Amino acid sequence: MIDRGDGVRLAARLQPGGGPTLMFLPGYMSDMSGTKAQALMGRAQATGRQCLLLDYSGCGASDGDFDKGSIRRWAEDARAVADALAPGPLLPVGSSMGGWIMLHLALADPARIAALVGIAAAPDFTRWGLGLTARDVEQLAHRGFVTRPSAYADSPYRYARALVDDAEGACLLGGPIPLDCPVRLLHGDCDRDVPWQVGQQLMGCLRSTDVQLTLVKGGDHRLSAPADLALLWRTIESLSG
């Protein structure tokens, strides 16, 4: 457990090894026990690569209140864990919302970033994905959260006011994103949660000239089938020289 500096302890797991540290950044309401995180850790162990997993505050085994979490708060969590356990070069791998967090982590210290890999990266999803109505805005003000059905859980996903309020200042797709590192974006063309066009828009916003968007025919949002995980690892290896 890593104390982020205010008494909130963040759960993390480090696999020592070589190369830039692979750092997996989970999606919304996910944690380091997920399929892609565990697959990445397993391949890192098998190949001697350094790999770092974490749970954001309020998620998984970490301390904290989930309803106080936000994109920039969770990006700061990721940076605190990286600073404590893997202070060298990073190769962040961001899944869905983790792709948004990945960008903020990179913008905070771009010289430290060897490359970025997004899996169905979902920057700015609060703008194009939540579809907040006037009633939702009222519920956020009075109840403090809204809910949306999810295909990945038995109960609806909860979106708190702290997340929505912070998101407006955290949005990135409205202008150039000043990152120059190599970026690889993997996206399923049958993704029902994050349209692949979001990846295309992100590619256009990134200042880097070394950006590739790979569309996976028939791929869903998770991209966690064996062939998808093999593609992820090949992508990482191609960035590692």
Image (cartoon, rainbow, N blue to C red):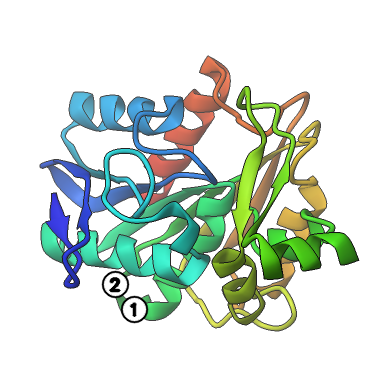
* Residue type for callout 2: Arg
Viewer-side residue, 61 vs 236: 61
Residue at position x 38%, y 55% in the image: 65
Left or right placement of residue 92 versus residue 212 in this view: left
Dividing the picture into quarters, in which one does residue 61 lie? top left
Marks 1 and 2 sit apart, C-alpha to C-alpha, by: 6 Å
Identify the mark at residue 109; answer none if there is no mark: 1
From where the camera sits, is residue 69 visible? no
* Residue type for callout 1: Asp
Left or right placement of residue 19 versus residue 110 in this view: left
Against 67, residue 22 (above or below) is: above
Residue at position x 50%, y 52% in the image: 98
Residue at the disc numbered 2: 112
Marks 1/2 in contact by CB < 8 Å: the verdict is yes
Percent of width and height locating residue 96? 59, 47
Residue at position x 70%, y 33% in the image: 150
Dividing the picture into quarters, in which one does residue 203 lie? bottom right
Viewer-side residue, 156 vs 172: 156
Against 59, residue 88 (above or below) is: below
Viewer-side residue, 71 vs 8: 8
- Residue at the limit of the structure toward the right, as seen here: 134
From where the camera sits, is residue 228 visible? yes
SS label for mark 1: loop
